[in-house]
Amino acid sequence: MNEELAARLRANPRYRNLVQRRSRLAWTLTAVMLVVYYGYVLLIAFDKELLATKMGAGVMTWGMPIGLFVILFTVAITGFYVRHANGAYDEATEQIKREVA
């Protein structure tokens, strides 16, 4: 990319807005994911009894569904970001490309 095109891109207010919105969402989702993941790790470290407690009369303990929740939450939050990015960010990116070029 030549320098003049890069400078026009950086000066475009829609581009700056897109970068700001994308960064805000990415950092928010990162913080939420870290809270869920490290919350689970801290639960393993400090409350093993809860995770070892059996659910009903069977052999499954609370640790299994909570661990499964962490995995499914990761997939869901990734899917949310991809869907949002494909919908909002791709359209805005194409519009910015047309304006700058």
Image (tube, rainbow, N blue to C red):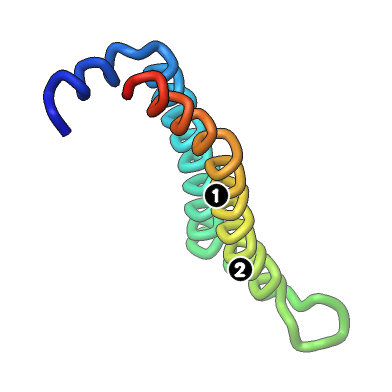
> Disc 1 marks which residue?
82
Number of marks: 2
Q: State the residue in front, 19 or 14.
A: 14
Q: Is residue 38 left or right of residue 57?
A: left
Three-letter residue code for mark 2: Gly
The residue at the point 29 percent across, 20 percent down is 9
Residue ID at (53%, 64%): 44
Q: Nearer the viewer, residue 89 or 32?
A: 89
Dot in front, 1 or 2: 1
Q: Position of residue 81 (x, y in %)?
A: 55, 45
Q: Is residue 69 toward the left or the right of residue 13 in the image?
A: right
**Could you say which is closer to the camera, residue 32 or residue 4?**
4
- The quadrant holding residue 15 is top left
For marks 1 and 2 on the same chain, the one whose residue lies earlier in the sequence:
2
- Residue under the image location 51 percent in, 33 percent down: 25
Give the SS element for disc 2.
helix
Q: Amino acid at mark 1?
A: Val
Q: Is residue 15 left or right of residue 47?
A: left
Residue sticking out furthest to the bottom: 59
**Which residue matches tag 2?**
67
Where disc 1 sits, the SS reads helix
Taking the spot 48% from the left edge, 39% from the top edge, the residue there is 31
| C-alpha distance separating marks 1 and 2 | 23 Å
Q: Residues within 10 Å of mark 1 (few under 14, many from 20)?
A: few
Residue 65 or residue 47, whichever sits in front: 65
What x and y, as percent, mark residue 4? 15, 19
Rendered-image quadrant of the N terminus? top left
- Vertical position of residue 95 compared to residue 28: above or below: above
